């Protein structure tokens, strides 16, 4: 695996945002924005993709969002989409990134959308895997995967077995046996440091009315069996965005970049190469 280099930046509010990166520092930058969930981090969400993108000549940037990974995890606050977006954007600027392609899964997809809307000069193009924030928050929290994730996290019985069940929820049952013990342990170590506020006080808007404002090329990829963000939302992008293509994968859950790693890497790199 490509060597990961690390840095941490103090941003507005006194929060620390941790960033890892791999690849040539002079290569075109790609910012990988991970999703939510107990134990999530940049590296753990995209470990099966890093080498392929570095090998294709990209600089891979892996922030840990506020509340996740090795970044600050404040309690007693609302985790708003604006907070996620502003803190990661400020850290990226401090890291020397002034423009990049954005690769976002789930919540990370929503952050990529808002970052593009707030700072259109920053985003070159977008690769979105089951992006969130294109419907009302309440409609997501009744999705079976999210309902299980919130109810099972943070209680006194939360343990490695619970962590494995939560990660298994992210993928199609056919893929679940492929989840490694190392990934479970890595995410469990992070989850034990997270306040429940990270999930129960998450506040996300519906950005779907603004999708038509995004002129950058977009590639949307979705698992047909996603229990977190419904695959039908891909049509929102096709209907409203001026430059978009979409792909759906059968027998695939919420983690296209993990469950279909080789295909995801190939399709995404081809798309990005055509829009350098």
Image: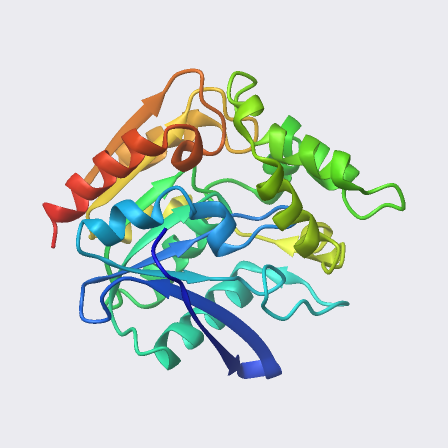
Left/right of residue 66 with respect to residue 243 in the rendered view: right
Where residue 239 appears, as percent x and y from the top left, is 28, 33
In front of the other: 158 or 85: 158
Residue 241 in sight here = no
Where residue 151 appears, as percent x and y from the top left, is 78, 38
In front of the other: 117 or 200: 200
In front of the other: 40 or 225: 40
Residue depicted at x 75% and y 67%? 75
Q: Quadrant of residue 247?
A: top left
Left/right of residue 34 with respect to residue 169 in the rendered view: left
Residue 201 in sight here = yes
Image: 119 above or below 276 = below
| Quarter of the figure with the C terminus | bottom left
Residue depicted at x 71% and y 67%? 77
Left/right of residue 80 with respect to residue 108 in the rendered view: right
User: How many numbered discs sit on the rendered protein?
Assistant: 0
Image: 213 above or below 14 = above
Colouring method of the image: rainbow
Residue depicted at x 63% and y 41%? 184
Where residue 224 appears, as percent x and y from the top left, is 43, 20
Where residue 26 appears, as percent x and y from the top left, is 18, 71
Residue depicted at x 31% and y 55%? 102
Image: 87 above or below 165 = below
Image: 175 above or below 99 = above
């Amino acid at each position: 695996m490509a060597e990961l280099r690390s840095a941490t930046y103090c941003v507005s509010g006194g929060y620390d945002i941790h960033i890892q990166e791999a690849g040539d520092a002079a290569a075109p930058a790609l910012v990988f924005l991970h999703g939510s969930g107990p134990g999530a981090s940049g590296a753990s969400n995209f470990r099966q993709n890093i080498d392929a993108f570095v090998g294709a000549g990209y600089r891979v940037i892996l922030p840990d969002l506020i509340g996740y990974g090795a970044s600050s995890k404040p309690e007693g606050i609302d985790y708003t989409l604006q907070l996620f977006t502003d803190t990661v954007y400020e850290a990226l600027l401090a890291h020397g990134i002034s423009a990049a392609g954005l690769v976002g899964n789930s919540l990370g997809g929503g952050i990529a959308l808002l970052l593009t809307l707030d700072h259109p000069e920053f985003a070159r193009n977008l690769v979105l895997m089951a992006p969130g924030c294109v419907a009302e928050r309440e409609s997501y929290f009744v999705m079976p995967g999210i309902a299980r994730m919130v109810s099972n996290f943070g209680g006194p019985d939360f343990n490695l077995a619970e962590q494995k069940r939560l990660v298994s929820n992210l993928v199609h049952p056919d893929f679940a046996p492929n989840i490694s013990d190392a990934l479970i342990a890595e995410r469990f170590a992070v989850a034990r440091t997270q306040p429940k506020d990270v999930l129960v006080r998450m506040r996300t808007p519906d950005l779907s009315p603004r999708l038509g404002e995004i002129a950058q090329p977009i590639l949307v990829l979705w698992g047909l069996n996603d229990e977190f963000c419904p695959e039908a939302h891909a049509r929102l992008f096709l209907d409203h965005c001026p430059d978009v293509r979409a792909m759906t994968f059968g027998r695939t859950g919420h983690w296209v970049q993990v469950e279909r790693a080789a295909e995801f890497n190939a399709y995404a790199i081809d798309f990005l190469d055509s829009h350098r």
